Image (cartoon, rainbow, N blue to C red):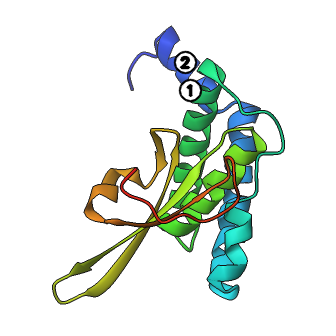
Amino acid sequence: MGVRTSSSHRADSARRSPAVYLRGVEAASYLTAASLAIRFLPFRRLIPIFTRVLPCPEMTGPARSRAIADVRRAVLGAAARLPNRPVCFPQAVAAQAMLRRRGVGTTLCCGVNTASGHGLNAHMWLVAGDEGVVGQEIAAQFPLLATYSNVGSPVAQDSGRI
């Protein structure tokens, strides 16, 4: 067993703070709700959820970056621990809902590709401005088909790559 330094102790206590646990519970709740909605509702009924405008003025500056990082960590951490292992679509929807509550505008992106022998593949990812939130790591493999933004006009747009 190694010696614990004060910096590693601070990191451990930050991970275990009540705010981190609460974000994890919030993320697990949103992931579960998103998974159920995606499974049982037609896509056209989900679009108004993806495009609901922010309920408050948009957050800016370091607080915005911190909110994005906190939500990313919570969603990815909760997804890894849930028994159904939510994939890209529920992760993007959950992160969008969490960031919307915090006043961070986002765009849900849908891309598709064809893989030899596997037919049509789809991928969803979420961006906040030009910053990837979740799913952006493999987005380049999926040409953009549509975007759904909660900033500005609540209309789905066909667009080029983000």
Find residue 76 and name its label. none
Identify the image quadrant of the N terminus: top left
Residue 23 visible somewhere in the drawing: yes
Secondary structure under the numbered disc 2 in the rendered image: helix
Q: Residue at 65% of width from left, 43% of height from top?
A: 105
Residue 36 visible somewhere in the drawing: no
Q: Residue at 38% of width from left, 21% of height from top?
A: 2
Residue 3 horizontal side relative to residue 85, left or right? left
- Neighbour class for label 1 at 10 Å: few (<14), some, many (≥20)? few
For mark 1, what is the residue?
12
- Seen from the viewer's position, the closer of residues 143 and 4 is 143
Residue 16 location (% of width, % of height): 65, 33
Q: Residue at 60% of width from left, 32% of height from top?
A: 15
Q: Residue at 53% of width from left, 68% of height from top?
A: 89
For mark 2, what is the residue?
9
- Neighbour class for label 2 at 10 Å: few (<14), some, many (≥20)? few
Q: Is residue 141 above or below residue 61?
A: below
